[in-house]
Image (cartoon, rainbow, N blue to C red):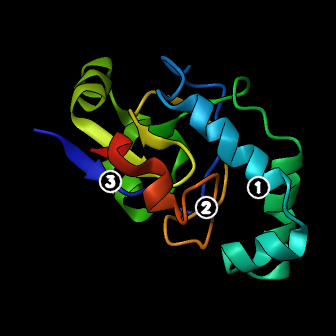
Amino acid sequence: MKIILSPAKKMIVDTDNLAPVELPVYIDKTAEVLNWMKSKSKEELKAIWKCNDKIAEQNFNRLENMDLYNRLTPAVLAYEGIAFQYMAPSVFEIQQFEYLQNHLRILSAFYGILKPMDGVTPYRLEMQAKVGIGDAKNLYEYWGELLY
């Protein structure tokens, strides 16, 4: 059985406690999304993100300095939404992380599909965002069958 979660908007960086096991499987496609986002102005991104000026500024700065390969946090520790808070992975033992690694998947508009111990960096992007990358009209089409 697989457990599927949506990511949370709020994310943290935690490079001190537990190192990621690997990079997300579709990191090359994530790099395409990142390049597309970097090609947009702050105002365009604010509209895509549907957020206030403060959040837009924070996430625009994140994009400018984003590194998909360094200073990464395991996905299950990076997201701070309610499902992740109640799961409380910060108090897990090794066996619990191993179970999650085998049974939990996180569906992300930025990374596609994530395993809990995949290394991620904070981002802001929702599947419903009006984003056209390459021939894809939206993120559902962009990630397509890779999510199934």
Label 1–label 2 contact, CB within 8 A:
yes
Neighbourhood count class around disc 1 (C-alpha, 10 Å): few under 14, some 14–19, many 20 upward: many
> How many angstroms separate mark 3 from mark 1 (CA)?
24 Å
In the image, residue 54 sits, relative to residue 22, either above or below, namely below
| Residue occupying the point 60% across, 73% down | 130
- Relative horizontal placement of residue 129, taking residue 34 as reference (left or right): left
Residue that extends furthest to the front in the rendered view of this protein? 135
* For discs 2 and 3, the disc positioned in front in the rendered view: 2
Neighbourhood count class around disc 3 (C-alpha, 10 Å): few under 14, some 14–19, many 20 upward: some
| Residue occupying the point 65% across, 60% down | 124
- Sequence-first disc among 1 and 2: 1
Please tell me the numbered disc located at residue 37: 1
> How many angstroms separate mark 2 from mark 3 (CA)?
15 Å
> How many angstroms separate mark 1 from mark 2 (CA)?
10 Å
Splitting the image into 4 quarters, where does residue 145 fall?
Answer: top left
Please tell me the numbered disc located at residue 125: 2
Identify residue type, mark 3. Leu
Secondary structure of residue under mark 1: helix
> What residue is disc 3 on?
5
Identify residue type, mark 1. Met
* For discs 3 and 1, the disc positioned in front in the rendered view: 1
